[in-house]
Structure formats: structure tokens, C-alpha cells
Amino acid sequence: MPENSSRSISAPSLFSAFSPALQAELRTSATRKRFCDGQFLYHRGDPADGFWLIDQGQVKIGYFSDDGDMQVIAILGAGDSFGELACFGQFVRVIDAQAMGQVDGLW
């Protein structure tokens, strides 16, 4: 299994910038979900009605090329969050997010 790569251009997750109190509140109220290897957390074009915090496992984010291969932008791991900007900006998803092995996430 690949090691975690740095986030896109080494940018920290937005979740990490939240106050400890807000992080704790979001973790407590979040829905926990488990994904199997290859399962999608979301697809490009989906509405952004929440964001993910990876509790365990790894998620690759990217997009599919015309030939059907996924062009991976980053591999995220435990403690990483993603999808916040689309959620708060009320945009549709611009990337696909796919589990690499078993993934436990908080929504």
C-alpha cells in the first residue's frame, strides 16, 4: 500500500484550521461510515453537502481521464480531511474520491 503523499501542494486541510472545540464538536456529531477497497466516497459532479475526515485508511482523490484511468492528485490518510471547500462554497464535486483498502471516515 502506498504511503501518504502530501496534500495538494502541501496545503493543510481546512479542518485542521478549525478551533479544537469546533473539531471536537464536528467529530461528535459526525456520521461514521466504512468503505471497502475501490468504493467511492463521492464522484465528480455530486452535490457537496458535507465533507470527510479520514479516521483510518487511505483515500485517493483525482479524476478519470478519457481512457478510463484515474489520474491521482493525492493520496490522503488518517487525520486528513477533504471536500470542505466545495461544501462551504456550495459547489458540485470537481474530483472523485476512492477508498484504497478499508477506510473509516467521518462525514
Image: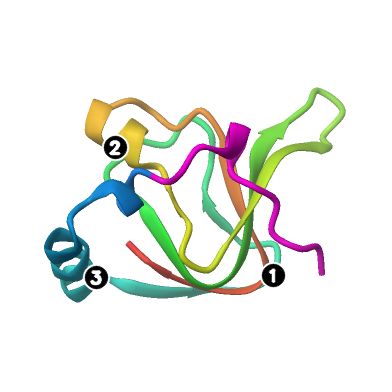
Viewer-proximal residue, 15 or 41?
15
- Horizontal and vertical percent position of residue 97: 57, 48
SS for dot 2: helix
Disc 1 designates what residue?
Answer: 37
- Horizontal and vertical percent position of residue 85: 34, 33
Viewer-side label of 3, 2: 3
Residue 27 image label: 3
Disc 2 designates what residue?
Answer: 87
Taking the image as shown, residue 26 lies to the left or right of residue 16, namely left
> What residue sits 34% from the left and 53% below the top?
16
Mark 2 Cα-neighbour bin, 10 Å: few <14, some 14–19, many ≥20: some
> What residue sits 38% from the left and 28% below the top?
92
Question: How is the protein colored in the picture?
Answer: rainbow
Task: Please tell me which of labels 1 and 2 falls first in the chain.
Answer: 1
> What residue sits 22% from the left and 51% below the top?
18
- Horizontal and vertical percent position of residue 20: 19, 63
Q: Amino acid at mark 2?
A: Cys
SS for dot 3: helix
Q: Is residue 66 magenta?
A: no
Viewer-proximal residue, 76 or 96?
76
Residue 71: which quarter of the image? top right
Task: Please tell me which of labels 3 and 2 falls first in the chain.
Answer: 3
Q: Are the residues flagged by discs 1 and 2 in contact, CB closer than 8 Å?
A: no
Taking the image as shown, residue 57 lies to the left or right of residue 86, namely right
Q: Are the residues flagged by discs 3 and 2 in contact, CB closer than 8 Å?
A: no
Q: Amino acid at mark 1?
A: Asp
**Location of residue 102 with respect to 53 vertically, above or below:** below
Viewer-side label of 1, 2: 2
Task: Please tell me which of labels 1 and 3 falls first in the chain.
Answer: 3
- Which segment is the magenta one? 1-13
